[in-house]
Amino acid sequence: MTFFKFIRYKNLLLIALTQILVHYGFLKALDLPTALSDLNFFILSLATLFIAAAGYIINDIQDVAIDRINKPNKTFIPAPFSQNSAFNYYLVLNISGVGLGFLLSYRMGFGNFATLFVLISALLYVYANFLKRVLLLCNLIVSVIVASAIGIVMVFDVIPVLQGNEQQLVNPLSVLKDYAVFALMLNFLREIIKDIEDANGDYAAGIQSLPILLGLERTAKLSAYIAVTYIFTVLGYIYVYLQANVWISLYLVIAVVIPLVFFCIKARYAEKHKHYSFLSKLLKLIMLLGILSLGVLTLTLKY
């Protein structure tokens, strides 16, 4: 169980659930043309999870000193793992993930797609070692990587069969793009909250994050204002694209808009570490509920 906690198995399960919903709960459920067989989808998902797990490990290796300050009672390189053994696990998972990506690309006859796995893997390494110190860019990079869990399914599942099926796939492709943007937006907000949680360690390490520049409470208030823009974005999206679909509109209001309003209220008055930790968990819940709305959308379209 220690190893699974080490690689953030809960986050990996969320990634797997997202990809399963996109492939089986949306595209296949609506009988749309898809390029991935069951085996190829399994390879894609496994490659994604391996690379993501490797990314968590390399990030923890680089954050040992910071984590000792931020989480003195908790270590993310737990016994029996040393830093050397953790790096070996990183190499095995990373090479396995990229290797599976190459295997998938050549099985499907799209060898050039394999570079996506190399790019994501390299980006995770560069982030952990260098980009983490670049103000806001680090938050954006992580958010793009999170959104790529949806994007990579689009690339392998939809793009290869798009020609000749444009009329069937143009709207579903647009929906998936919107979900990827939604994942990016929410994760960007969560990264800001995580920076507040980690401010002490970041300050000691010389990292110029937003909370260090603005202060913890000001950054929390800023996150509330960002969340307000998200609320109006979601409401605008519902009005423009979904107002005829009552059930998905209702679900998004209850599962996304109302929790974001609650987030705004709590962030506006947050001042202690436990408040910031709660906000981070709340955003993760909103992300989960938002991704599940894809299944709700499918049900409304089918029935």
Image (spheres, helix red, strand yellow):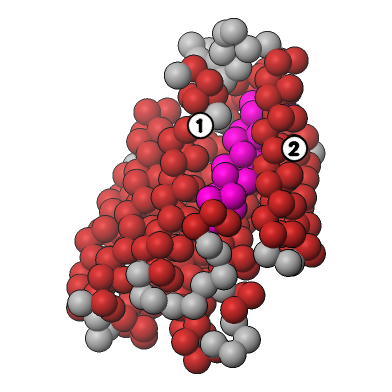
Q: Residue at x 49, y 17 (%)?
A: 2
Which quadrant of the rendered structure holds the N terminus? top left
Q: State the residue position of label 2.
A: 95
Question: Relative to the observer, which residue lies in front, 15 or 286?
Answer: 15
Q: Residue at x 68, y 11 (%)?
A: 82
Task: Give the class, few, some or many, for how many residues have Cα within 10 Å of label 1's Cα (few <14, many ≥20).
Answer: some
State yes or no: residue 294 in magenta. Answer: no
State yes or no: residue 62 in magenta. Answer: yes
Looking at the image, residue 109 sits to the left or right of residue 235; the answer is right
Task: Give the class, few, some or many, for how many residues have Cα within 10 Å of label 2's Cα (few <14, many ≥20).
Answer: some
Residue 116, which numbered label?
Answer: none
Q: Which residues are magenta?
A: 41-63
Residue 8, which numbered label?
Answer: 1
189 vs 111: above or below: above
Q: CA distance from mark 2 to mark 1?
A: 19 Å
Looking at the image, residue 8 sits to the left or right of residue 265; the answer is right
